[in-house]
Image: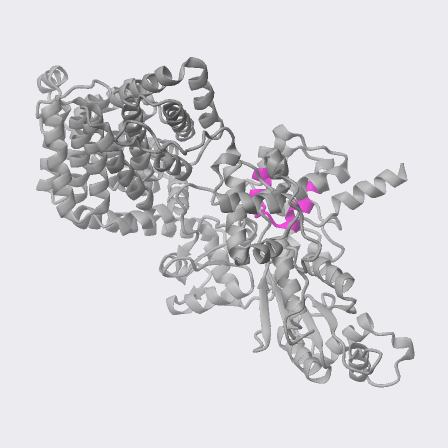
Amino acid sequence: MPHRESRAAEGADAFVGREPESDRLAALLLARTPLITVVGAGGIGKTRLVTEAVRRYRRARGVPVLWGRLARLPAGAGPEAIVDELVRSVADTGFATGSSWHTLVETLDQRDSEGRAAQTVVVVDSCEHLRDSVASVIVRLLDAVPELTVVATSRQPLERPEERILPVPPLTHGQGVTLFRRRATLTGTVIEDDQLAVVESICTHLGNQPLPIRLAAARLRRQSLGAMLEDLSGTATDRRLRWPRGPRGGVEERHYGIADAIAWSFDLCSDPERLLLERMSVFAPGYDSNPDDEPGEDLVRNAGVETAAIQAVCGGTDDAGDRLEPAETGPLLEQLGERSLVIVNESGTAPRYSMSENIRVFAHRRLCERAESEPSRLCAEHGRHYRDRIAESAAAWFGTRDRRLLGWALDEWDNLLLALETSLSTPDRAVVGLEIATGLFAHEVPFINGRLRDARRWAERTLAATRGARPEPVALQVSAMVLIARINLCQGRPEDTRRLIERCVELCGVGIDDRDAWRRHPDRDVGLPARLEFAIGAVLMFDHEDLGALHVLERARDKFSASNNHGGVAMTEGCAALASALLSPPGQALENTARFLDTAGRSGDEWVEAWAQMAWTIARTRHGEPRAAVATGRTALARLVLTRDTWGAIWAAHACAWALAAAGSRSAARPESMRYAADVARLLGGLRALRTQLGIDITTLRPFASETSRATEIVRTALGQHAFDAARRDGTSMRPALADLARWALDVPSPGPSGSARPDRPIRTSPWQRLSAAEADVAVLAAAGWTNAAIAARRGSSRRTVEAQITRVLKKLSIRSRAEIHPMVPVDHRGDGPRRDFRPWCVPEGRR
């Protein structure tokens, strides 16, 4: 029926998200700010945001709103042409008697019934290609028309002193999915819940930008979701720029396709800006996130690359003679950031730059068109740059154990993986890739950031690709096989681990007789390199639970020390302390871990001390002092989370769970002990989920598996099978991130001196129980329909604080949007809607 069709179209075109930006724009309008410039990339939704915000403002305040659209004017048009265009848009020219300027001023100069100047809002849309001319017109209008507010939309600021800039970020992940689902209904497609993961991936590849999402959803008439996702590879096979053009994303031609939206900005760039943008396409894409989105990873990275990396890779002269001087790079990057073509991340000590995947694909196509050899040349430069930086970092790590070097590697992870991928083109390039892979392992990066699957896959691929190099880099290949063996052990592949270590021993030139003797007595020294000794010690410790691991690890430590590899020494000492804590008799375990803790404390290295505290915690838990171990284990866990050590933090969380379980086993008080045991069971369930997520098979890490089984049995006995299964399933089903697990472990109450847990602690029976009192209050108000601005005013806090609280609420409740909060609110908390006397649109003092 036509009526239903109309309603479907209306729902599909409903405004999605943008609450914070709408609130800010409303506040600026209420304050009668003279010039507000809404800034963002092409297709980000600037015009739609302004349309909705001024419509609401006009309805609430009765203020006239006029529109002037400048997109059809050619770039560089002068002030006179802009005035004429504005007059055509906002004035009734049939009755105009004076000049265009006079008509425009007369139209905008609104008066009330008593002849006093009244506020008028004029929206000047699409200013970026006319920036200087339109700025001069706006300044003249503000001088000529009292109480005028100009809202400009532009891909870059107008650079006027009176300008207030309102940046527009992408949609949140949840909003992007919502928009896609709504637009899909126009094609007759209903997105089912089991398809949401694919839809979210599509939206992520499209940068969660409204225009590309609308264009993608329109393709559902001809293309499945799976085929669409294949189109968005971000590589040479990417087809998003080849999607047929048409007026599906917007009525203006520059919105007919993704390429059209980007080309509009690209064509405004100078030649050096275009050249730099094209060359930057050899770097990994970045991401511009919405502040309301939770971080995509447990340990947040700084997106983008530093200026020095861009200078090193993108500088110089190409085969066509086009040259970029290093000194030009900084100013050019700033200008590209102003044009919304480059994402500028200023969260660290120095700005970092990247491109969205859409712009990167566009720029790479232009790079290929410029010169056929350019992509290959720049990819080689990119690989060599990261190989050299990894080598410098590894050398410094050997000498100083400087954790900042680790932070650099974590931040550069995407570009390091990209360098590994592009290195596979030839055997000689693969040698560079293998140097990167082994260098990453040199300071334990894949273990620190938890990317074991990625690391093993790329180490195996680059290792295989170097087999064709002449000469083969045997020593480098051995290092890579050692590192792959360690990952195999963690992922439940002990046979592969043993096979690789056997091959490494053979390649190291150990004779047949010595190899046979070594197989019988792995702790025998047959002249192996330190890193291989370390891997053998790890196998003895984890796969065999053999106390001989201590001898091998001590020998590895001595070999690292002889080569002045202090990072290797620290790593090996930490592993040896764990081995002693897990395998040694009580007296030796307690003595060794206490000695390592004392040494680590005097080293001044927080990371080393945290590992020492973890070993100390395990030793005391295993040998009768679990209550003393709990506090130290928590300190170790908190430190390892802060130092971004995923691997260490996972096992510190396990050590805390073991200590908490053992300490609780001595509690006789009920029901407090039942509440306590249920919390520990949930923690054990969350740890199981996290191991699965990271690809860790604990069964081949036998000492860890034994301690986890012991803790599980203690808690199961305390709760009974049914209650234990329910509590552990609760923890597993929440699929907590590492940061959440750390909070859980820190939050479980320690048994007091009497042997009972704190008596006032409630049993956590639902995700709602995870909210703090303030978060629960904010969640109730949000569920009742309050805006962030209204909640902030009600609670006497800032809007930014409320935004952060809403983000935490969504994360803790494991939901994606505010609309999903209401069903989660307990019945006795509901009904707290907005008060009728609250005035979120109140006018600031002095402008009433």
- Magenta region, mostly helix, strand or loop? helix
Q: Which residues are magenta?
A: 200-218
Indicate left or right for 456 with 256 as reference. Answer: left
Query: Is 319 or 454 nearer to us in this picture?
Result: 454
**In the picture, residue 494 is in which quadrant?**
top left
- Give the image location of residue 479, x and y in percent: 23, 34
Task: Check residue 345 for magenta coloring.
Answer: no
The N terminus - image quarter: top right
Indicate left or right for 90 with 18 as reference. Answer: right
The residue lying at 64 percent from left, 41 percent from top is 819
Q: Is residue 523 visible?
A: yes
Q: Is residue 36 above or below residue 528?
A: below
**In the picture, residue 539 is in which quadrant?**
top left
The residue lying at 81 percent from left, 78 percent from top is 112
- Give the image location of residue 168, x and y in percent: 59, 58
- Give the image location of residue 108, x and y in percent: 78, 77
Q: Is residue 64 above or below residue 44?
A: below
